[in-house]
Amino acid sequence: MSSSKGFTLWFTGLSGAGKTTLAVAVACKLRARGLRVEILDGDEVRMNLSKGLGFSREDRDANIRRIGYVCRLLSRNGVAAISAAISPYREVRAEVRAAIERDGAEFIEIYVKCPLEVLIERDVKGLYKKALAGEISNFTGISDPYEEPRAPDIVIESDRETIEESAAKIIAALEHRALVPKDETNTDSQEDLVARARG
């Protein structure tokens, strides 16, 4: 079964929170339901679509607008577009949402939440250590602000949930919105999963 209704899943959160890992897990589940899916990963976009942009607020906003524009094109053409980028500023996130919704597609903001102290402890790429030492400037969460979503559609607590639990919450929310076909083999209560998705 395939859905022709496109939408955008917008993963936002600090570096290392698990946005890309979760985006890939959700994409696999969506493809298994017959959906066409594209992932726009923040790091990959910066190497290609946004090559040459820095990390000033202006450049960050330009980067997010570019990701948003591609998501809008994909969503209005029946694709499930998934953005996994820090996107630290509320104003440009709202701007992207408005543009996508104007085209008649749904925009689902997913806040991948993780305490800064946990991220510093994890620090898989060693970026927080460098930022704290002053070796990286304009680093979100350390020397640059991150504006948490005030009313995200879905909240993921990546320090408390497994990838599978988080992905299940997102899929349940999409089923609830009738954006993906239901999996009749799923034994979890629809109401329970939707309640968890709302945080």
Image (cartoon, rainbow, N blue to C red):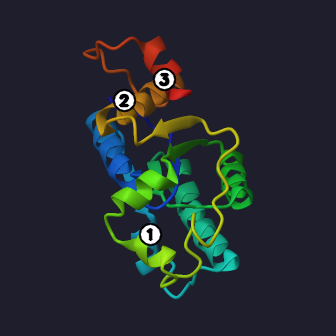
- Left or right relative to 52: residue 95: right
Give the image quarter of residue 167: top left
Relative depth, front residue between 9 and 34: 9
Q: Position of residue 179 (x, y in %)?
A: 49, 31
CA gap between label 1 and label 2 equals 29 Å
Relative depth, front residue between 130 and 103: 130
Question: Which sits earlier in the primary sequence, circle 1 or circle 2?
Answer: 1
Q: Is residue 48 visible?
A: no
Question: Which sits earlier in the primary sequence, circle 1 or circle 3?
Answer: 1
CA gap between label 3 and label 2 equals 10 Å
Q: Disc 1 or disc 2, which is closer to the eye? A: 1
Give the image quarter of residue 34: top left
Residue at the (35%, 41%) spot, across then down: 26
At label 1, the amino acid type is Tyr
* Vertical position of residue 32 compared to residue 86: above or below: above
Q: Which residue is mark 2?
A: 168
Q: Which residue is mark 1?
A: 128
User: In the rendered image, which quarter contains the N terminus?
Assistant: top left
At label 2, the amino acid type is Ala
SS at circle 2: helix
Q: Position of residue 128 (x, y in %)?
A: 44, 69
- Marking on residue 196: 3
Question: Which sits earlier in the primary sequence, circle 3 or circle 2?
Answer: 2
SS at circle 1: helix
Residue at the (66%, 46%) spot, across then down: 149
Give the image quarter of residue 184: top left
Relative depth, front residue between 33 and 9: 9
